Each structure stands twice: as C-alpha cells, then as structure tokens.
Image (tube, rainbow, N blue to C red):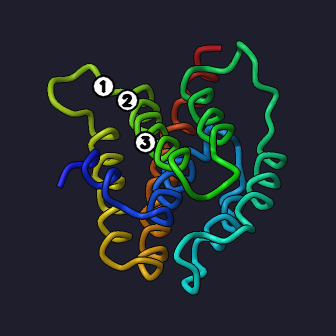
Amino acid sequence: MSLVELIARVDARALAASGLACLDRCLPLLDGDDEVLRPLWATLADDTRAEPGPDWAGELAQVRDKLAGTGGEDEDEAVLLARVMLADAPDECSGPALRTWADACSAAALRVHRLLDPAADTNGPAPLVAGELRRQVTVLELLAAHGPAGLRPALEISTEGRRVLRAVVSRRARGRDARL
C-alpha cells in the first residue's frame, strides 16, 4: 500500500503518531533534546482511549516553548520546514486537521531529507529520501496493524531516522565551518 493510501486509512492515533514521527526525525534541525517529544509520544500510548487523550494540547504547548527558536530569514529551508511541522500541529488530536497535519508532515519530512541529501541530484531516489519514505510507510503499517502496541516500534524507527539526520546535519555544519 502506498504512503498516501496508508495516511488516508489510518485512525487518529496513527495520524498523530505519523506526524509526530516525522517531526521527531527532523528534531536535529531544531536543536532539540532527543527526549523533548517523549511526553507527546506518551499521550498517544494510552490504549484505554480510542483517540489520543486531552493531555496532547498541554504537552504540545510545552514542546513548542522548549523548541522555540529565533526563526527568521537566516534559517535555511529545511529548518523552516521543521518549524512549520511543529507550529502547525493541531491542539486537538482528532478531526480533519489531524489528517491534514500528518499529510503535511509527511511531505515536509520528505522535502527536508531531499534538501539535506548530498546525492539528491543523482538519478533515482536519493538515499536519505528513500530511507525517510521507508520509515514513514513502516510507521503507518505498524500502527495500522498493532494500534497502540505499534507505538514503541514506531518510536524506535523514528529514533533511528533522527540519528541518521543528526549525522547529516553535523556533517553539513562541519562542511560549512571548514569553508569559513
């Protein structure tokens, strides 16, 4: 099943986790602590509810405060895309806004990986983009098949993707420093 089909078919918890996973993998661009999104993941783990709990809005506000950056025109497109993912996260973890956000996060995360991939000008899918696409599909498949029990493996996949992107961001920063 394609990524678009998966996003169209999953429930609110999976949509929230999908968007959150995309944001989690892009966290190195926001200079965020690896644990900063953990409370949001925890709100999704309550399997006694059909949809994520009301704590989502409060935890989201705290994450936004912690990751508030200076913003502005000096930030590159990849950083701005990550900031938009966080800013556009809906305060209510249900309804059509959640599906729109998850879809937008998917596209933004793929764009971020395309921007940061040094092999993006080659024929065929660039390795970072292909890896991000694979992670997005796997996260949605896990959540569709296992519900709340799929959150832990989805988080592990996101952690792996965050490490990959952190290495790319670090390499890119060293390259910039060497040119100065």
Give neighbour class at mark 3: few <14, some 14-19, many 20+ (Cα, 10 Å). some
Residue 16 pos. (x, y %): 53, 58
- Left or right: 7 in relation to 43: left
Disc 1 and disc 3 in contact, CB within 8 angstroms: no
Q: Earlier in the sequence, mark 2 or mark 3?
A: 3
Foreground mark, 2 or 3, reads 3
Where residue 40 sits in the image (x, y, percent)?
66, 64
Q: Amino acid at mark 1?
A: Ala
Q: CA distance from mark 2 to mark 3?
A: 17 Å
> Whole-percent x and y of residue 107?
41, 35
Q: Quadrant of the N terminus?
A: bottom left
Circle number at residue 103: 3
Residue depicted at 71% across the width and 49% down the height: 32
Q: CA distance from mark 1 to mark 3?
A: 22 Å
**Residue at image location 56% in from the left, 30% down from the top:** 81
2 and 1 marks in contact (CB < 8 Å): yes
Residue hosting label 1: 120
Give whichever of discs 2 and 1 has the lower sequence position.
Answer: 2
Front residue (pair 121, 170): 121
Q: Position of residue 83 (x, y in %)?
A: 65, 34
Q: Which residue is mark 2?
A: 114
Query: Badge 1 local density, few (<14 within 10 Å), some, or many (20+)?
Result: some
Q: Residue at x 30, y 75 (%)?
A: 145
Say above or below: 35 vs 108.
below
Quarter of the picture containing the C terminus is top right
